[in-house]
Amino acid sequence: MRKFLVVLDNTTECLNAMRFAALRAANTGAGVTIIAIIPPDEFNHWIGVADIMREEARERIEAHFEVFSKRMQEKEGIMPELVIREGKTELEIIDYIQDTPEIGVLVLGAGTGKDGPGPLVTHMMRQAGSLPIPVTIVPGGMSKEAIIAVT
């Protein structure tokens, strides 16, 4: 089954990317994989403290995922899967795409701030020509109605 890959992070544009991925998956008979990356620099402490921080980060991600998962199940009938990886966000996403042939589209949300679409979108667009799948960028300011209309 083809799957849409969407990144779970703490940005507001993440919401639009999640909605777009869920609607497209529901309308095309595909699935959704939600990937969350724990940056390695969060654990530059003593080993015991690093282990506790890593576990707390995983718990936050899983709680955040549950909110999106419940919504996708109730609204679109989609049961997303969660993948948690540790490392540099851009590299982990590219590695996961290359290692997972079921992934058919990467869906990213673009920020609306004066700093541009965000570092992840900027980086992935530079890599778009070498990726084995298309990248869909969902504007952070796009309305729910507009997302529904294009999906």
Image (spheres, rainbow, N blue to C red):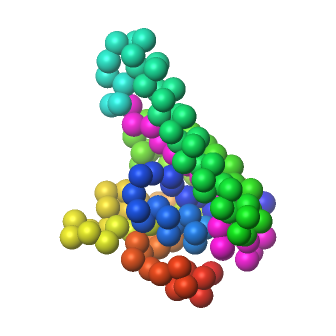
**Residue 126 as seen in the image, left or right of residue 95:** left
Quarter holding the N terminus? bottom right
- Does residue 135 show up? no
- Does residue 58 show up? yes
Number of marks in picture: 0
Of residues 73 and 6, the one nearer the viewer is 73
**Residue 129 x %, y %:** 45, 66
Work out whether 111 lies above or below 40. below
**Res 29 → quadrant:** bottom right
**Residue 41 x %, y %:** 33, 31
Determine the residue positioned at 60% across, 53% down.
Answer: 67
Determine the residue positioned at 39% across, 57% down.
Answer: 11
**Residue 113 x %, y %:** 26, 69
Work out whether 39 lies above or below 48. below
| Residue furthest to the left | 114
In reply to whether residue 63 is colored magenta, the answer given is: no
**Residue 150 x %, y %:** 58, 85
Of residues 140 and 59, the one nearer the viewer is 59
In reply to whether residue 26 is colored magenta, the answer given is: yes
Of residues 70 and 37, the one nearer the viewer is 70
Work out whether 84 lies above or below 49. below
Of residues 101 and 144, the one nearer the viewer is 144
Determine the residue positioned at 66% across, 73% down.
Answer: 23
Determine the residue positioned at 22% across, 65% down.
Answer: 115
Quarter holding the C terminus? bottom right
| Residue range highlighted in magenta | 22-40
